Image: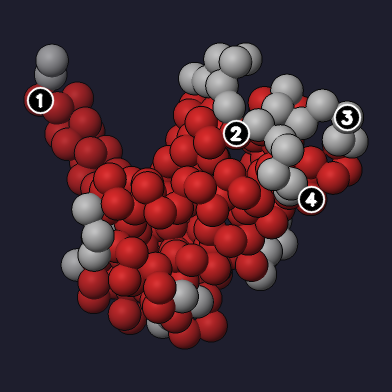
Amino acid sequence: MSRATERTDQRREAGQRTRDGLLAATQELLARRGQEGVTLREITDRAGANVSAVSYHFGSLKALCDSAIENALERNLDAQIDEVASLDPASGVEDLAAAFAGPMMRALAAGGRDLAVMRTVARVGIDPPEGWGRLTAKFQQSRRDIVRQLSANAPGVDERELDFRIRCAAGLLNWLVLAPIGTELAAEPPEQIERWLVPVLAGAFRGSPDVG
């Protein structure tokens, strides 16, 4: 490798680290206060970056916030899709609930940036921003996979009602991670989080005691 190529690679790596640091700092601040409460100076101070780095990598504060939100949503969707896809057709409603809530439960147990990312996901889930188009296909895939798995445990229930149950379960998770009870739950061991949370979500999926 030539010295010039090595220098180019080092600059690229440094630029990627700066970009990732700005996204992480933005996600943490968004999780605490929402988009209206975040300033450019706070983000750059937390990331240890120059204000000019925001313009270089993202163009504007709004574009940075939008990228941070999309990044958080995509991470959550990818993890959820993978967990639901790992289920087999014979999996029950509680298995589905555990897969559906898996990313959130791990974030509650881990704290730190993982939890900050989930709080960002929860905020935008409650008050969706514009410009989700890039993730539409993943949202649709996630919904299809969950409906397919749930319908096997709820024969005779139409897709509209299944979709309603899924949205209720998602709303519960969004509220939980932002409400004070989420902080209390995060202080519990991972096994306790799962033991308390999964049956509640399974109940939302069931909709009646006769399902699953």
Indicate the secondary structure of the residue bearing disc 3: loop
Could you give the CA–CA distance between mark 2 and mark 3, rounded to whole angstroms? 15 Å
Question: Going 29% across and 52% down the picture, which residue do you hit?
Answer: 192
Q: Which residue is mark 2?
A: 93
Confirm or deny contact between disc 1 and disc 4 (CB under 8 A). no
Q: Nearer the viewer, residue 18 or 78?
A: 78
Which quadrant of the figure contains the N terminus?
Answer: top left
Give the mark, 1 or 4, whose residue is nearer the N terminus: 1
Q: Is label 2 in a helix, a strand or a loop?
A: helix
Mark 3 vs mark 1: in front: 3
Q: Earlier in the sequence, mark 3 or mark 1?
A: 1
Given the image, on which type of amino acid does mark 3 rest? Gly
Residue drawn at x 19%, y 67% as measured from the top left: 48
Return the disc, 2 or 1, that comes first in the chain's sequence: 1
Please, is residue 195 above or below residue 99 in the view? below
Mark 1 lies on residue: 3
CB contact under 8 Å: marks 3 and 1: no
Q: Is residue 190 left or right of residue 30?
A: left
